[in-house]
Amino acid sequence: MKVQLFAGMALIGLAACGPDTRMQLYPTSGPLAETSPPPAIAVAATNVTGTSGELRFRLPDKTRCKGTWSSVVPRVQSQERGLNLSIRDLGGKLTRSSETVGGVNSGEIYAVCRDGTIVQGRFAMGSGTTSGTGSATDSRGNTFKLLF
């Protein structure tokens, strides 16, 4: 019974450490796109509710790669100045605020593989979502469609 409880707790712990979402790289041109069928590369991305995180994946030849993704969230800065003539708060008023703007956020991925291959690309994702689309290239001459 203790062994089963320990195994269950270990599995829960491993699941909590796992990646948050999967991205997919689909070859559109280059050596990988010429294979039949072209391989889809699953990319594990962490911290998808934030503005940056880690990437981990393997190329079709099993080469391990890791890197970073980052997204720019547009913000609006506003400043208000005025004169307040109320009895309670006589004097000037100065406020500053910053807020996130909804819409489409742009981002980039960059990864280095153990054999020195570099994978880099750009993507667009909806504000407040964990889905998006983009493109990437690698130093082996491949171009990819990036979907998540």
Image (tube, rainbow, N blue to C red):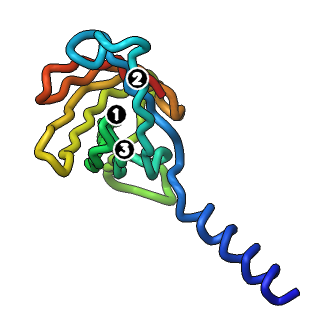
First in sequence, mark 3 or 2: give its number.
2
Q: Nearer the viewer, residue 105 or 47?
A: 47
Q: Nearer the viewer, residue 37 or 52?
A: 37
Report x, y in % for residue 36: 39, 12
Binning the other alpha carbons within 10 Å of mark 3 as few (below 14), some (14 to 19) or many (20 upward) gives: many
First in sequence, mark 1 or 2: give its number.
2
| Amino acid at pointer 3 | Phe
Q: Is disc 2 placed on a helix, strand or loop? A: loop
Q: Is disc 1 placed on a helix, strand or loop? A: loop
Q: Nearer the viewer, residue 87 or 63?
A: 63
Q: Image point 48% across, 50% down: which residue?
A: 86
Q: Is residue 144 above or below residue 63?
A: above
- Please say if the residues under marks 1 and 2 sit with CB atoms less than 8 Å apart: yes
Measure the C-alpha gap from mark 3 to mark 2. 13 Å
Binning the other alpha carbons within 10 Å of mark 2 as few (below 14), some (14 to 19) or many (20 upward) gives: some
Q: Is disc 3 placed on a helix, strand or loop? A: strand
Instruction: Kindly report which numbered mark, 3 or 2, lies closer to the viewer in this rendering.
Output: 2
Instruction: Kindly report which numbered mark, 3 or 1, lies closer to the viewer in this rendering.
Output: 1
Q: Quadrant of residue 63?
A: top left
Q: Image point 53% across, 32% down: which residue?
A: 129
Measure the C-alpha gap from mark 1 to mark 2. 7 Å
Q: What residue is pinned by disc 1?
A: 60
Q: What residue is pinned by disc 3?
A: 57
Report x, y in % for residue 112: 18, 46
Q: What residue is pinned by disc 2?
A: 39
Q: Nearer the viewer, residue 4 or 130?
A: 4
Q: Is residue 23 above or below residue 147?
A: below
Q: Is residue 87 above or below residue 83?
A: below
Q: Image point 81% across, 79% down: which residue?
A: 4
Regarding residue 78, the answer to whether it shows in the image is: no
| Amino acid at pointer 1 | Pro
